[in-house]
Image: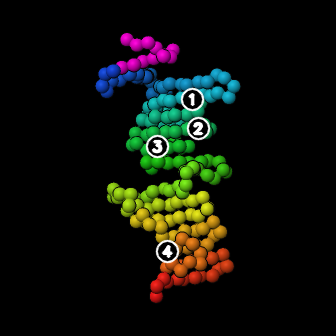
Amino acid sequence: GTSPATRLHVESSAAASQIIRVKGTAADGYRHGVELANGHTGGLTHSIFSTNNSDGFFGGGKLVIANEDMNSVDANTSGLLVLDSSGNVGIGTTSPDRLFHVKRSDSGGTAAKFENSAGTVYIELNTNNQGGGDSGYIGYNSDKDMLFLTDDTERMRIDGSGTVLVGKTAEGTATDGIELNRQDVIVATRDGD
């Protein structure tokens, strides 16, 4: 009941309808899923598959997205995303043990990058369903300052030159706070007393 827009076009107007299911019922140890391949220069084969209990590499009950065909995925596969039966997501690991687990196994060091092209980038931390105004943050700005916030207020920063500022945002100001500068000098300031 449609005019196909691609070589395979599956469409449904029913609410909550299952459009496509890929199901394998072969013996334990087999993977069942879909492979997407680009055969042109620089193209890769990517696979999306589900595992069962006898999968020697992943174990059972996991959804895997990998940058190889599903039968070649093993310990040497570099591009890997795993969703386990507990809802844990792993990147670079086959056994995520936290809600979000990123693992890098080479000497490169950096496992994740957070970027904001429009200004300061923050990672928000909160507990017990706190609203945004009650949260803690770790931030980094374009002046190369590392910021630490509690209760939505900046409490400390390490500026781009290495000076530690507690309760203030710049060196040499009359604002209440403490600074430990590069010359190993500690300056404590009280405003209005």
Q: Please, what is the three-letter code of the amino acid marked with disc 2?
A: Gly
Judging by the rendered image, the residue that carries numbered circle 4 is 167
Q: Position of residue 106 (x, y in %)?
A: 65, 48
Q: Which residue is mark 1?
A: 46
Task: Find residue 68 and report its image quarter.
Answer: top right
Q: CA distance from mark 4 to mark 3?
A: 37 Å
Q: Are marks 3 and 1 in contact (CB under 8 Å)?
A: no
Magenta-colored segment: predominant secondary structure: loop
Looking at the image, is 9 positioned above or below residue 74?
above
Magenta part of the chain: 1-12
Q: CA distance from mark 3 to mark 2?
A: 14 Å
Give the distance between the C-alpha atoms of the residues marked 4 and 2, in whole angstroms: 43 Å
Callout 3, which amino acid?
Answer: Val
**Amino acid type, callout 4:** Gly
**Mark toward the start of the polypeptide (3 vs 1):** 1
Between 141 and 43, the one nearer to me in the picture:
141
* Farthest-out residue, bottom: 193
Q: Nearer the viewer, mark 4 or mark 2?
A: 4
- Distance, label 2 to label 1, CA atoms, is 9 Å
Residue located 40% across and 42% down the image: 87
Query: Residue drawn at (52%, 73%), measured in percent from left and top?
Result: 168
Q: Is residue 14 visible?
A: yes
